[in-house]
Every structure is written in C-alpha cells, then in structure tokens.
Amino acid sequence: MKPHILIIEDNQEIRENTAEILELANYRVSTAENGKVGIEKAQSDHPDLIICDVMMPVLDGYGVLHLLHKNDELSGIPFIFLTAKSERSDFRKGMEMGADDYITKPFTDIELLNAVESRLKKAALMKKEYPAGIQGMQEMLNEYGEKETLENISENRPENTYRKKQVIYLQGNHPQKLFFIRKGKVKTYISNDDGKDLTIGLYSDGDFFGYTALLEGTTYKETAETIDESLIAEIPISDFEHLLFTNKDATKQFIKLLAKNISEKEKQLLNIAYNSLRKRVATALVTLMNKYQKEGEDQFSIQISREDLANIAGTATESLIRTLSDFKSEKLIDIQGSRISILNKKKLENMLN
C-alpha cells in the first residue's frame, strides 16, 4: 500500500503543488487548508506522515503538533514543518516540541522528496521488531547505518572466565560495565530478607546483561550468577554510553530491544502469583528449553540444580522435586542426576494454556 501523507497548508498554490509532487512520486496524499481541518483528517485517516505549515489561521502548526502529541494514536506520526521562516528560534521551538524535520520555503522537489523518504524510512525502522540478543542488535544497527558500532562495542574486549555458580555482580552494587556472554549461561535473581531467591532473567551466548542499572543510572536491583562455566566480555560504561548517544533513533530502538524482558518478567510474576505448582514447573522447563535449546537439537536436556530450577519456578525445592517426580512418571521428562531431558514438550506447553 502506498504511504499516506497529509499536507496541512493554508496557501492553496503551495498546498496543491506539494501534493502534485508527492503524488507523482507514488504517494497517496490528502490535504487540509488549516490546522483544525488537519487535526480532523489526521484523526480519521491516520496518515503515515504529516507535512504542516507553521503560520496558519484557526490553528497554527505548533498547535497542530501539540494536539497530535496529546493523542496516543497520533503522537508517533512523523511530522515535518513547512515554513518560510528560517530564524534559529523557530527551528529550535519546533524541534523542542517534537518535530522530526523542517523544510524551508521555497524548496526544490528533491529537498521535499528526500525529507519525506528519510522520515518514512526511520518510522518504518522504529516499528520493526528485532530478535533478541546480539543478532537483533547487529541487524538493527546495520539498518540505521551504524554497522561498525556493535562490532566495536563487543569485540576485542577483556574477557573473564567465570566458574559455575560464580557471582558476577551483586544486588546493590554500582554498575561499571556492560556484560556480553561469549559462551555460557547466566541467571539474574533477586533475594528477599529471608534469603530466598527468585530467578528473574536467563541469558546465554550472544546476550548482553547488566544494562538496566546502566540505563537507569542506579545500583543493580538483582544479582548475576553463572549457571555453567562462562566466558564473558566486559564493556566499559563509557563505551556503552557512547553507543546510546551516537544515534537518537537507534538509541530508541536499542532501548526497546533491551526492554523486552520487562514483559517476560510480568508474565513470570503472574505465573507465580496465580498458577498451580504443576503449571509453574512446566513453565520453568519450557522457558529453559526455549532459551537454551540449540538449533537442530531433536531433544533438549540441561544440567541444572534443583535449587536453581526451583528459583525459576518460584517454589520450594522440596515441592519442585515432587513435581519433577510426577512429570517423570508421566513420561514428560527424564531425570539422570542433575540433568533433566524434556521428552514431551507439547504436553508441557499444553499445561500452560
């Protein structure tokens, strides 16, 4: 479908000429002769981009932008000001209000089309979902034209080998580094006053972790500990901040990508609060399989302590052991020492529905 552009301009000649240029470039165009009509059309049509004059009767361009930002359904539409004014104060006011770009009249066809194409491309990138981990970040930054950034931030960094069940950082510490897993498995967990732990994050090869405290500028809210022996690269906080500030649009998508775990944690808390013990244990096993099963593996197995698995499921170790025994008798899993193999993933997943 052709991208839809709304032009809000009180000058009929400019409005019609701008619309003609964009239609020749294969865009779908609608027009409005003042800001009030423009807001009405934006609400009814939901265009992909808005080009708006600054000085207009009834409602000026600043008023249009203000009303758009107050509407959750319209606030994300790319917005380009069209103005004959070139004073720096006007540019600054528009950008501070959230405008994406300016086109100063008179403008050429190429100036108009380049601005429109650039803003539509960036808007499409902002809507795109990327896979988690290093591959998703690399894909994102490649598309934003920052191909070397991620390679530089994770390559040629000091690497430390951590033993199994070794603490990487403690809850309450001040962050100094961003961590990247070359090889291994890491969990993050929180502890209550009674010393009981709840695992809130699982990480493996190609994952960054420890970034939430860096983004918030606070201390760690959790403890990070290895599940297996792991090789971990350490990235200085200054380099991480450079990545965040290099590209505004990439930063938004980068934070969006890293923040996906928030919804996962919400689901985990709901699972612990409202689901039965069998369902919680099944959820923990399926979560481990989805996180750590390697591509091409027919059957998934993992060596994990009963205590660690209980912390993921949010239950007591004794209760977990009884439930695992039930699952084994039902031929859902097999148990050999500390190694658990999933025999029937489909039935485990059916428990979750």
Image (cartoon, rainbow, N blue to C red):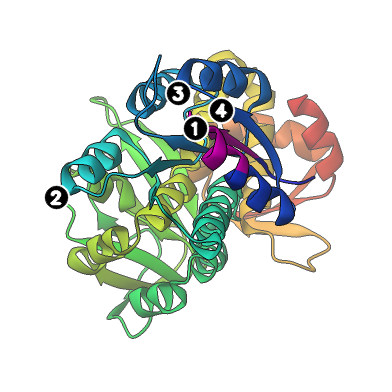
Residue 23 visible (yes or no):
yes
Element under disc 4: helix
Q: Nearer the viewer, mark 3 or mark 4?
A: 3
Whether residue 206 sits left or right of residue 100 in the image: it is: right
**Place of residue 224 in the rendered image (x, y in percent of width and height, measured from the top left):** 33, 52
The quadrant of the image that shows the C terminus is top right
In the image shown, does 94 or 297 lie closer to the viewer? 94
Q: Nearer the viewer, mark 1 or mark 4?
A: 1
Residue placed under numbered mark 3 in the picture? 68
Whether residue 262 sits left or right of residue 42 in the image: it is: left
Whether residue 208 sits left or right of residue 269 in the image: it is: left
Q: Residue at x 82, y 30 (%)?
A: 350
187, above or below 152, in the image:
above
Residue placed under numbered mark 4 in the picture? 267
Q: Kindly indicate whether the residue at mark 2 contacts the one at mark 1 (C-beta within 8 angstroms).
A: no
Residue placed under numbered mark 2 in the picture? 174
The residue lying furthest to the left in this view is 174
Q: Kindly indicate whether the residue at mark 2 contacts the one at mark 4 (C-beta within 8 angstroms).
A: no
Element under disc 3: helix
**Place of residue 16 in the rendered image (x, y in percent of width and height, measured from the top left):** 62, 40
Image: magenta residue range: 5-16
Q: Amino acid at mark 2?
A: His
Residue placed under numbered mark 1 in the picture? 9
